[in-house]
């Protein structure tokens, strides 16, 4: 199997230019994690004080949940801290976790980006789709249907299809043991907030964002990064797309410079906070026009949903959706 073509930093930067781009800060990565949790805490406090702000808080918290996943992604590349042990501790315990398994999976994506062996190829393969199809997907995300299919439907299916001698409580207990952080975090948060009358806080201000806004912005981010990128694309400057993000998009959709995805694929060990500077240097050198970029997320979505309405699937499962379901089922086995 052929790996995707790669670029070398020396092809674009002098040693003096490259050194500060590749440098990993001992404080910026931890500060970004602290920032994500502080924003989550402030948004939750705002919603508890002013319940009318709950919809706003759900969007802010869901985006920071994505932000924590992005920072775990940086840790998977060893870019969150110069000390690898500290890097892995931060990535495992202060973000969604599962760092070791994710690192193995994700580095395969980089090695075979947009090639047949790319484990993420199914995320970009269905595009373009119709506007109706995109709208259906977004509705499913915002109503929790995507979350249910990915997280809970496999458990119910496992219970229904249990073998003779298997008990439903045992299957549920095994499910809980595989997700200790989720259930322990819920128990601690409910215990801490219930005495003050906020027993609902975890459900509304953590679970609800993770079940609605997080799936939506994760989908939109995936579309922006790799949709409409040709399979077996030979040009390493076009394996991923960088998308301009305005201030609102950085708050609600693309935190922590995740929109600089082409630069990330070109130089995957550059910390996320150095990606804007990387792009500026590439632009100054005349490289940017040859890279895959987009002026905004709406522009990408228009292209990604440009299939004629007459070709709408009518709600049938796409390869992307079938792949997600297979991954969810595999997680329970």
Image (cartoon, helix red, strand yellow):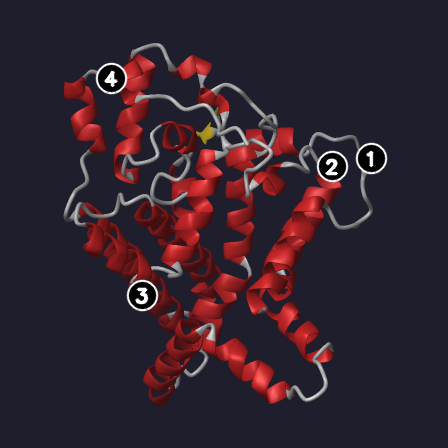
| Label 1: few (<14), some (14–19) or many (≥20) C-alpha neighbours in 10 Å | few
Callout 4 secondary element:
loop
Horizontal and vertical percent position of residue 73? 37, 48
Q: Which badge, 1 or 2, comes first in the chain's sequence?
A: 2
Q: Residue furthest front?
A: 1
- Tell me the CA gap for discs 2 and 3: 38 Å
Residue at the location (70% across, 73% down)? 157
* Residue 13's disc number: 4
Q: Which badge, 3 or 4, comes first in the chain's sequence?
A: 4
Q: Mark 1–mark 2 contact, CB under 8 Å? A: yes
Mark 2 lies on residue: 130
- Tell me the CA gap for discs 3 and 1: 45 Å
Q: Which badge, 3 or 1, comes first in the chain's sequence?
A: 3
| Label 2: few (<14), some (14–19) or many (≥20) C-alpha neighbours in 10 Å | many
- Tell me the CA gap for discs 3 and 4: 40 Å
Residue at the location (62% across, 54% down)? 324
Mark 3 lies on residue: 41
Mark 1 lies on residue: 311
Callout 2 secondary element:
loop
Residue nearest the viewer, comparing 50 with 152: 152
Does the rendering let one see residue 51? Answer: yes
Residue nearest the viewer, comparing 183 with 19: 19
Horizontal and vertical percent position of residue 1? 55, 32
Q: Which badge, 1 or 4, comes first in the chain's sequence?
A: 4
């Amino acid at each position: 199997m052929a790996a995707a073509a790669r670029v070398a930093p020396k092809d674009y930067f002098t040693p003096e230019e490259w050194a500060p781009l590749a440098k990993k800060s001992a404080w910026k990565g931890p500060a970004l994690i602290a920032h994500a949790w502080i924003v989550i805490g402030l948004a939750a406090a705002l919603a508890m004080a002013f319940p009318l702000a709950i919809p706003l808080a759900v969007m802010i918290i869901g985006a920071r949940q994505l932000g924590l996943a992005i920072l775990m992604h940086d840790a998977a590349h060893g870019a969150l801290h110069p000390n690898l042990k500290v890097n892995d501790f931060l990535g495992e315990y202060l973000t969604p976790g599962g760092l070791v398994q994710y690192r193995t999976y994700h580095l395969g994506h980089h090695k075979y980006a947009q090639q047949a062996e790319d484990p993420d190829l199914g995320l970009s393969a269905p595009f373009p789709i119709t506007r109706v199809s995109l709208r259906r997907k977004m509705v499913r995300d915002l109503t929790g249907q995507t979350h249910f299919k990915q997280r809970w439907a496999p458990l119910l299916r496992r219970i229904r299809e249990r073998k003779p001698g298997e008990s439903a409580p045992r299957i549920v207990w095994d499910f809980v043991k595989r997700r200790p952080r989720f259930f322990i975090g819920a128990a601690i948060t409910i215990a801490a907030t219930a005495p003050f009358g906020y027993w609902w806080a975890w459900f509304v201000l953590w679970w609800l964002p993770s079940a609605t806004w997080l799936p939506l912005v994760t989908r939109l981010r995936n579309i922006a990064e790799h949709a409409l990128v040709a399979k077996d694309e030979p040009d390493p400057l076009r394996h991923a797309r960088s998308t301009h993000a305005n201030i609102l998009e950085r708050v609600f959709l693309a935190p922590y410079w995740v929109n600089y995805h082409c630069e990330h694929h070109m130089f995957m060990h550059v910390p996320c906070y150095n990606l804007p500077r990387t792009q500026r240097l590439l632009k100054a050198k005349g490289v940017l026009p040859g890279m895959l970029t987009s002026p905004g997320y709406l522009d990408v979505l228009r292209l990604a949903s440009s299939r004629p309405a007459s070709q709408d699937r009518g709600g049938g499962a796409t390869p992307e959706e079938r792949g997600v379901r297979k991954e969810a089922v595999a997680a329970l086995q």
